[in-house]
Amino acid sequence: MSAATKLHKTSWCALRQLQQYRTKANFSGSSASIAKRNDLFNQEQRRQRDAVGRIDKIEVRYLGLPEDVTLVMNGNISTPFNCAQHLSEGHCKRSALALIDGSVPWDMHRPLQESCTLQLLNFHVSEPHVVNKAFWRTCSFMLGAALNRAFKPEANLQLHSFPGPNIKSGSFVHDIVLQTQNWEPAKEEMRALSAEMVKLAAQDLRIERLDVQQDLAQEMFKDSKYKSEQLPSIAQQTNGRVTLYRLGDHIDISRGPMVASTSFLGKCVISAAHKVAEEGPSGAFYRIQGVALPSGFQLNHVAFGVLEERSKKPSPARLPNEPFEEQQQLQLS
């Protein structure tokens, strides 16, 4: 195994030490790009908040336990999470996703634009399909953050994209490019990735959404070859707008929605890494796959082992070196 592709060791101590080394040694490279991307995200987030101007009151009709109630909130400022704060602490902790007017999935921290009905979804609702899809999409997003944290800078890791969630496939995925064509990860490396996912969950990081113009997205991802190539097609299908998500300092492109926080990730295993195509004279595309349960869900070792083995099978999702064929795929996930 080459030094360029060696992952951090699995012990918490080793992970912390190597991350400290990475931060000091590579700040002028990828870390500087991450910092710039976050600065632009923060600036645009503030600009959009300041542009709200006159605050209009909206009526949000909450439908659910303990009883239906009408809340008077601030249009383009108040979020479903703010509504949950008016109900109880339990609603805040359990609500992973919102449903607007009975049919529109909505991020918990995304401002509500007009009067509507509101349902707060958790993983125990009678029809969990919508929240499950958001959960799997979030797992792919978190995997991108975990990969960035786990690989050493000399691996020249580049995140490509993560296809939309396909629960029936048995795995969530994230596609990457490495400057090696013969990476075969050891079990210890896969455990290190799983450990990074667990760390993200423990940090309870809020997942933020921001819609931006294409030119700003191009500026934010100008150091990312693949994101820069994807953005024109995405913006063409979305009237020049691009939807971004952030957890911690990790920002990526996705149509969403996603669950409210990384804390909704429970038991998780990154189970497989498949080489799917070569890229240039020395690089290759790899598809990283995993399986997870929402927090609070328990399965015995044997049952979860069955899910883990299933998740190792190559995902049938569109490959990263294939052209986008459907409009709904253009937002990457």
Image: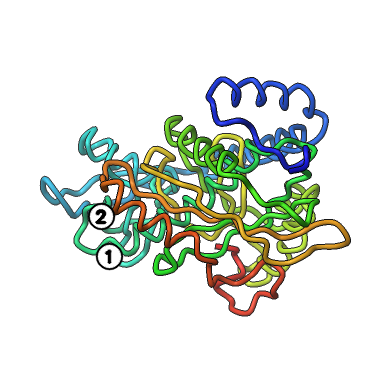
Q: Earlier in the sequence, mark 1 or mark 2?
A: 1
Which image quarter: residue 61? bottom left
Quarter holding the C terminus is: bottom right
Which image quarter: residue 238? bottom right
User: Considering depth in this image, is 19 or 228 the residue closer to the camera?
Assistant: 19
* 204 on left or right of 39: left
The residue carrying mark 2 is: 119
* 41 on left or right of 225: left
At label 2, counting other C-alpha atoms closer than 10 Å, the crowd grade (few under 14, some 14-19, many 20 or more) is many
Quarter holding the N terminus is: top right
Q: Position of residue 3 (x, y in %)?
A: 77, 37
Q: Position of residue 62 (x, y in %)?
A: 22, 51
Distance between the Cα atoms at labels 1 and 2? 7 Å
Which type of secondary structure does the marked residue at label 1 adopt? loop
Marks 1/2 in contact by CB < 8 Å: the verdict is yes
Q: Position of residue 139 (x, y in %)?
A: 47, 50
